[in-house]
Image (tube, rainbow, N blue to C red):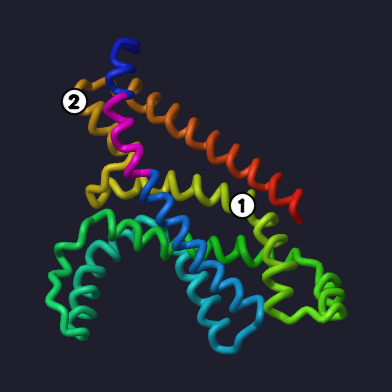
Amino acid sequence: MFDIDVLLPDLWDILGAVPLTLAMAFAIFVLSTIIGSLFAMVEYRRIPVLRQLVVAYKVAFKGVPMVVVIFLAYYGLPSTLQFLASLLGVDYNGHSTPNWVTLIVALTACVAAFQAEVVKGALNSFDTGQADAAYSLGYKKSQLFRRVMLPQVIVAAIPDLANSFMVIMKALSLGFAIEVVDIFAQSQLTAALNFYYLEAFLVAVVIYMVIAYAVTQIADRTERALRVRT
């Protein structure tokens, strides 16, 4: 039977995993957006060879399940880091790499492929007529990008970027497979102690909903503020 009395204790236990979950999500979001933006610029400018490599990267990481990439990173990243450190003459034990670092690297690699599509779509939405007008006014390419193109691209990408953040939040639950405890994993651990699984998972759902609402509000307000300026 459903027990209301365990909701509050479960809430306090699960809230303990929120800071780490948000920190990992933010790190993955920033890193994947930077990498994805670079990939999108390569495709947008149609840079030879690099463009083909970016397309191959996106096909690979969009097609492989995230959990598979996580396990590949879990078993392969420590040895790779140790090898790279040896090339630099650094004594580093790759197997001491924290699992949360492995999770961030794996999910960043996956999400970057999707972020590239988000930024690419925003770049393609830019009206080239504005570029012609800017050049006629004596703008350089760097000035056009910084003053005209970038503000509009950011505004166009904000809704999809907000969705990407929530996708990252949900993907972090896969980290329990390599012993990284996020909100969902903590709810499982909490329920394992008192056997009130329904109550623990409902608390986790509420926490996720609150975070989703906060992210949506921040994204909407940022978009409105930037549209006024542009």
Residue drawn where x is 22% and y is 65% of the image: 75
Question: Where residue 152 appears, x then y in whole percent?
Answer: 72, 60
| Residue at mark 2 | 193
Q: Earlier in the sequence, mark 2 or mark 1?
A: 1
- For this rendering, which residue is in front, 1 or 137? 137
Q: Secondary structure at mark 2?
A: helix
Foreground: disc 2 or disc 1: 1
Q: Residue at x 55, y 73 (%)?
A: 39
| Relative image position of residue 206 (x, y in whole percent) | 44, 27
What kind of residue is marked 1? Asp
Residue 1 in view (yes/no): no
**Is 93 placed left or right of 205 in the picture?**
left
Q: Is residue 13 magenta?
A: yes
Image quadrant in which you'd find residue 190: top left
Q: Secondary structure at mark 1?
A: helix
Q: So how many labels did they put on this image?
A: 2
Q: Please name the residue shown 18% across and 75% down the image.
A: 82
**Residue density around tag 1, few if under 14, some if 14–19, many if 20 or more, within 10 Å:** some
Q: Is residue 49 above or below residue 65?
A: below
Q: Which residues are magenta?
A: 12-21
Residue farthest toward the front in the current orientation of the protein: 138
Distance of label 2 from label 1 (alpha carbons): 38 Å
- Please name the residue that numbered disc 1 is placed on: 160
From this view, report whether residue 34 is shown above or below residue 43.
Answer: above
